Image: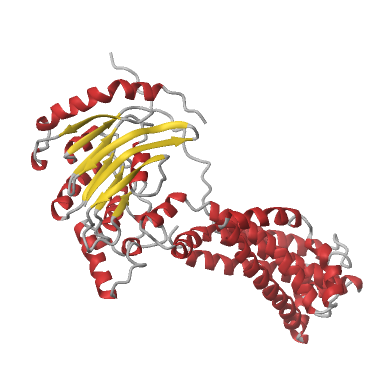
Amino acid sequence: MDLRLEGITHHYDGLLALDGIDLAVRDGETVAIIGPSGCGKSTLLGIVGGLLKPTAGRVVTVGAPRADSLNPFTYVFQDFALLPWRTVAANVALALEHHRLPRAERQARVQAALALTGLADFAAALPRQLSGGMRQRVGIARALVVRPAVLLLDEPLSALDAQTRELLMEDLLAIWARERSTRLYVTHNLDEAARLADRVVVLSRRPGRIREIVAIDVPLAERSGPAIAGVREHLWALIRDEARDAEREVQHG
Amino acid sequence: MAERTAPVPFRGGGFQPRPRRLVPVAVFVAVIGLWQLASARGWLPALFMPSPWQIVGALGDMIDSGTLGKHIGASLSRIALGWVLGTSAGLAIGLAMGIFSAARAAGLPVVSALFPIPKIALLPLFILWFGIGEPSKVATIGFGVFFPTVIAAYTACDSVPRNLIRMGQSFGLPAAAIVWKILVPGAMPGILAGFRITASIALILVVAAEMIGAQYGIGAFILSAGNLMQTDQLLAGVALLSLLGLAVSAVLGAIERAVLRWR
């Protein structure tokens, strides 16, 4: 299933946040969306998954999602959005409970998702007992359990410390090697974009417009240090000035 | 030349309340002991301020004559019935106001206008409507419990993080599932905090209502003891109220620990 964003424009209280975003995402591709803070990248992700209504434009799917996908557009949230009163396994199962599935299959799917994210031993733990990295693994397991066609990752590693982030990036690459989905990955972290994405969409500062789309030709397995240093430099050069402006801006409201 | 060494003085610590197991017991023993001593020495007039031992004796008399159970039973059954009715109605309305904008817009002005009324002021009206018997007392308690429950329930709904609700929507959860699996459990801490408030309101109202017209009940017992200047019995009734309040709060604490284990 391919994805097409057609002229996405969005206003917040009269303020233009996104201006005419056109983007085609191929099936199975990982597209990172980067830009300075306040460029509307999370807004764009909200629109793609149907959580926000754009002022103008539309998101269309081309072709049908995989038959076994229970929730074609599935998010992984920056703040994890776990239910604190549910155990790890129950948080993952939440995504399945309203679907008609045999009990055995539901359990098998939850077990498989927990195993894939290294959470098998933590099934009975409560979120508050887990570190940030483990909590986000629960968020990822919950997303995988519905076999998404499009995985929408909204700054998934931004709430984590640098070491945990590094570990989770490796985990994400390992998971993506085993699971077929299209991924839209919003981040302000250039490393994550350069390490994980096939293409990087660079948005300009408010109003968000596509400034450049950078394709990364280095194979995922070889994306360490020097191999992607050039890509990283290039991305930073694209957003540096605007990031500085964004940082110096006084917040209104 | 060797430099002089000086340790950096410790400046932290303190401002961290820690449990001291013996202090509470010691305070109780000291206060009651002093009181008993003052009564024994005749510093306190026995007619107006009986000694702790006399109060215990009055309680013993109540147990012997079997009136203790009757009074407590009457008060507890009024509290239980009124509290359950008021809480059920309050939760239904409060959750509706937490979920639906229209329900909130309709309910908030009514709740705001009626909440400040001391509910005991309505007892005469309820007596006219329902008679002097149980229904008027239960209605007063129920009414008094209802409004704080409504307010606790809808503000608790507001305190559930919206990102959890968006998460539910993003996984395609039906609206009913979002309410029962996300909103209501997320609102439980606020709702249970409201229960603590309504439990104490119910205790106040049951005593007040029983003082206006009842044969049995702790409030009626305290009033009649006062009329007969039986201060030992009067204070025995007051001590019973303290025990009753502590028992209710212990039950609520147990419920909180069970329901909010995840916190």
Horizontal side of B121 relative to B160 (left or right) equals: right
Residue A5 picture location, percent across and down: 29, 42
Horizontal side of B219 relative to A150 (left or right) equals: right
The residue at the point 9 percent across, 32 percent down is: A227
The residue at the point 26 percent across, 65 percent down is: A110
Q: Is residue B6 above or below residue B141?
A: above
Please indicate, yes or no, whether residue B25 appears anywhere in the rendered image. Answer: no
Q: What is the quadrant of residue A84 in the picture?
A: bottom left
The residue at the point 32 percent across, 65 percent down is: A96
Horizontal side of B63 relative to A104 (left or right) equals: right
Residue B15 picture location, percent across and down: 53, 41
- Residue extending furthest top? B1
Residue A170 picture location, percent across and down: 17, 45
Q: Nearer the viewer, residue A200 or A47?
A: A47
Residue A91 picture location, percent across and down: 35, 61
Q: Nearer the viewer, residue A105 or A54?
A: A54
